[in-house]
Image (spheres, rainbow, N blue to C red):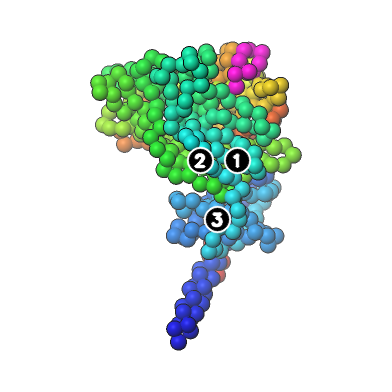
């Protein structure tokens, strides 16, 4: 009798799940051709941890849900102005193995795709790599090294002529906080710094791997020192770009908030914000090249212009590689002005270039960027296509198919 009751309850649960399982997804490509495009949508039931997605051809499509109730899959191919129908059903467990993997290695998180390293996130303060570096320069909360599909490192850390530069990082330079002027970029001044404060989440999966972390912008002029801003990062590496024209694709969302009741102001200045520092071998005008979405390849002419994306490249060990930095249209002052250094491998989206602004208590300052890392020369058509995917993603409509 007990066995029959348990069996009946099990069948009832399975039947209830099956009856709730019939969802359909209609994906509309919109005005752009889609190829290996990350597509995200809000799940119809946030309490359901795992799902199965079936494509128009009846084959399973890897899909991954997160703690926000958002699911993501990779749309293989869909022509502009066309739609595709998918079936979405609950699953008892994750059906596919991790396509992108995140592993903790001491103070770093390593991300790999198909056995290849994509990048590392330096969480806690890194060790100083040279004797000429003062302790004040120790920093955490940045991405380095960033690696191309062929294994070429394209970022630098603690470069000799700018000790405060770190791969991909996000400090502000010229600021005004409670009457003081902390500089969170030029750490050698000792007026400000940015500190890693913790990991809120980290994951691997068939569609993406990533992490969520927290940082704080510390005013060192104040006695005692005082936190001016708090920041959270959400970074995701996608399982795409493994075809003939290989590339690595990842994105960052930064959310900055006032730490207390005081606002922080940003006077007009030529740099500050999201920055990229290229490999040491790229140093020198002749060793690093740029290309903007406007078609500008002259670094002097490109400086202080505004663009949807900018590619920075050079040779490491004789191998050519680079990174495209894509700016989301929701970002403040989009298209954001750019700082392109005249001789060094440095790039920065710098909204302060066009005038003063501020972050006030109770407001979120949200910045979103996507990165395309590749070998060889920049592919403008690829960068345009990936920017279109980022800025104007396919539209997803979910409906009950019962």
Give yes or no for residue 280 being in the magenta stretch.
yes
Left or right: where does residue 306 sit relative to residue 196? right
User: What secondary structure is found at the residue carrying circle 1?
Assistant: strand
Main SS of the magenta part reads helix
Secondary element type, mark 2: strand
The residue nearer to you, when weighing 250 against 24, is 250
Q: Where does residue 55 sit, x and y in percent of width and height? A: 65, 58
Report the front residue among 77 and 142.
142
Q: Residue at x 36, y 33 (%)?
A: 230
Q: Please, what secondary structure does the residue beneath circle 3 have?
A: strand
Q: Earlier in the sequence, mark 1 or mark 3?
A: 1
Residue density around tag 3, few if under 14, some if 14–19, many if 20 or more, within 10 Å: few
Q: Residues within 10 Å of mark 2 (few under 14, many from 20)?
A: few
How far separated are the C-alphas under marks 3 and 2? 37 Å
The residue labelled by disc 2 is: 104
In what quadrant of the picture does the C terminus appear? bottom right
Mark 3 against mark 2, which lies toward the viewer?
A: 2
In the image, residue 72 lies in the stretch drawn in magenta: no
In x, y percent, where is residue 157?
A: 53, 23
Circle 3 residue: 397
Q: Which residues are magenta?
A: 279-288
Q: Nearer the viewer, residue 266 or 63?
A: 63
N-terminal of the pair, mark 3 or mark 2, is 2
Q: How far is the residue under mark 1 from the one under mark 2?
A: 12 Å
Farthest residue, direction bottom: 1
Residue drawn at x 64%, y 23% as measured from the top left: 313
Q: Residue at x 51, y 18 (%)?
A: 130
**Which residue lies under the disc numbered 1?**
112
Q: Where 167 sits versus 100, above or below?
A: above
Labels 1, 2: front one: 2
Q: Residue at x 55, y 55 (%)?
A: 397
């Amino acid at each position: 009798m007990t066995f029959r009751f348990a069996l009946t309850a099990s069948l009832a649960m399975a039947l209830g799940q099956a009856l709730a399982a019939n969802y359909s997804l209609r994906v509309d490509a919109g005005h752009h051709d889609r190829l290996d495009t990350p597509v995200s949508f809000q799940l119809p039931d946030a309490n359901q941890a795992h799902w199965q997605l079936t494509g128009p051809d009846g084959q399973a499509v890897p899909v991954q849900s997160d703690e926000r109730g958002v699911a993501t899959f990779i749309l293989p191919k869909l022509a502009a102005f066309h739609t595709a129908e998918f079936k979405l059903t609950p699953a008892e467990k994750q059906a596919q193995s991790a396509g992108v993997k995140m592993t903790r290695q001491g103070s770093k998180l390593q991300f790999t795709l198909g056995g290849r390293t994509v990048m590392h996130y330096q969480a806690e303060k890194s060790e100083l790599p040279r004797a000429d570096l003062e302790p004040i320069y120790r920093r955490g909360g940045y991405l380095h090294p960033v690696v191309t599909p062929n294994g070429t490192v394209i970022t630098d850390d603690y470069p000799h002529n700018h000790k405060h530069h770190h791969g991909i990082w996000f400090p502000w330079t010229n600021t005004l906080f409670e009457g003081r002027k902390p500089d969170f970029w030029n750490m050698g001044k000792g007026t400000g710094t940015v500190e890693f404060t913790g990991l809120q989440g980290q994951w691997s999966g068939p569609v993406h791997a990533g992490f969520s972390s927290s940082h704080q912008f510390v005013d060192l002029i104040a006695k005692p020192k005082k936190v001016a801003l708090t920041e959270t990062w959400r970074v995701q590496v996608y399982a795409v770009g493994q075809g003939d024209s290989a590339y690595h694709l990842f994105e960052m969302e930064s959310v900055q908030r006032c730490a207390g009741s005081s606002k922080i102001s940003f006077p007009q200045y030529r740099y500050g914000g999201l920055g990229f520092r290229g490999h040491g071998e790229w140093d020198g005008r002749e060793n690093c090249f740029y290309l903007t979405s406007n078609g500008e390849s002259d670094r002097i002419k490109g400086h202080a212009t505004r663009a949807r994306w900018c590619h920075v490249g050079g040779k490491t060990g004789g191998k050519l590689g680079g990174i495209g930095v894509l700016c989301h249209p929701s970002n403040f002052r989009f298209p954001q002005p750019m700082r392109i250094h005249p001789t060094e491998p440095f790039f920065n989206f710098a909204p302060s270039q066009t005038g003063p602004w501020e972050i006030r208590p109770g407001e979120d300052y949200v910045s979103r960027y996507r990165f395309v890392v590749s070998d060889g020369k920049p592919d403008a058509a690829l960068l345009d296509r990936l920017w279109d995917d980022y800025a104007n993603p396919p539209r997803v409509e979910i409906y009950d198919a019962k």
